[in-house]
Image (cartoon, rainbow, N blue to C red):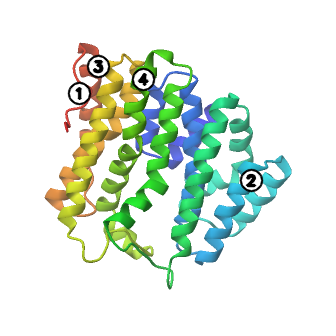
Amino acid sequence: MAKLEDLLEKTSRTFALSIPVLPEPTRRQVMIAYLLFRIADTFEDAAHWPPGRRVEALREFQELLSEFTPAEAAWLSGKWLAADPSPNPGYRELIGDVPFVLDAFFALDPAAAASVRGHVIRSAGGMARFVARSHDGVLVLKDIDDLRAYCYAVAGIVGEMLTDLFLLGREPLAAIAPSLRERASTFGEALQLVNILKDVATDVTEGRSFLPRGVPRSEVFELARRDLGVAAEYTLALQRAEAPRGIVAFCALPAELASATLRKVEESGPGSKISRLEVFAIKKRLDRALDRGEPAVQSRP
C-alpha cells in the first residue's frame, strides 16, 4: 500500500488529496484504477513520440489488461521505459512499475477488477482513436460534439467506473444508482473541461488543440459551468443518501477545486491556478460542512 501511495503522490496532485479519504476497500480499488488510467494517459500525452508509437503502446496496454502474464508485463514495461515515454519523472517511474501495479490490480476483488479493467480498456481505446487522428503530430478537435467525445474517452469513462465502485456492495445506495449513472460521465467531463481551459497554452505547445476552432471560448466555459452543476447534483445525491463520508468528500473536493479553478481562469486567463493556500481553505471548508451536515458543495446547478 505504501508503494501505491508513493506512486499516486508522484503522479497526481488532486487525487493524492482525495483518494486517501475513501473508505476501504474502495480506497485501494480507486488508487489502483487511477494508476492504470495514468499509464494510458502517459502514452496519450507522449507528444514526442510519433502517433503510431503512441497508438501501439495503448493497444499493447489494452492487450496486457486482457491477457496478463507477469513476463509480458515486465517485457512491455522495459520496452516502454527504454523509449522514454515522458519527461515527468513520476510518470517514468510508474511505467517502470507496471508489473507491480498490475500484480496489485489482479489481487482486487473480482467484481471490482472486472469493472476497472473494462473501463480502462475502453478509455485506452478511445485515446488511441483520437491519437490516430493526429496530423503532423497535432490533434485538432472539430467542434463541441468532438470535444465532448474526447472528454468522454479520457474522463467520462472514469466517472462511470468510479460510480460502479461506489455502488459495489453498498445496497443502501441502490435507490440513487440510476441518478448517479445518469450524471457520472458529465462529472468527468466537467473536470476535463476545466483542465483543458486551464492548460490550453501548454497543450498547443505539446501538439494538442482541444478547444475547437471557430467555437467561442465562452461556449466552452458555459458548458463547463453546466457540467459542474451536474457534478454538484451527483455529490449531493450521495450526501442525501447517507453514503460514507469519505465517498462524499472524494467527490466534493475535486468538484470544488474545479469550480475555483474555472473562476480563476475566467478572471486571469489560461495557465492560472489556485494556490496551495486556496486548496487548503477549500478542503477545510468542506470538512467543516461535512461535520455540520451542511451541503458538501457550494457550486449549485
The residue sitting at 28% across, 62% down in the picture is: 271
Query: In which quadrant will I find the N terminus?
Result: top right
Q: Which residue is mark 3?
A: 290
Q: Indicate left or right for 293 with 153 as reference.
A: left
Q: Which residue is mark 4?
A: 246
State the residue in front, 147 or 210.
147
Query: In which quadrant will I find the C terminus?
Result: top left
Compared with 161, 127 (above or below) is below
Marks 2/1: CA–CA distance: 42 Å
Circle 4 residues within 10 Å: few <14, some 14–19, many ≥20 = some
In the rendered structure, which amino acid carries the disc numbered 3?
Answer: Leu
| Mark seen at residue 64 | 2
Q: Which residue is mark 1?
A: 285
In the rendered structure, which amino acid carries the disc numbered 4?
Answer: Gly
Q: Residue 109 location in percent, x, y?
A: 68, 27
Marks 4/2: CA–CA distance: 32 Å
Specify which label sits upstream in the sequence, 4 or 3: 4
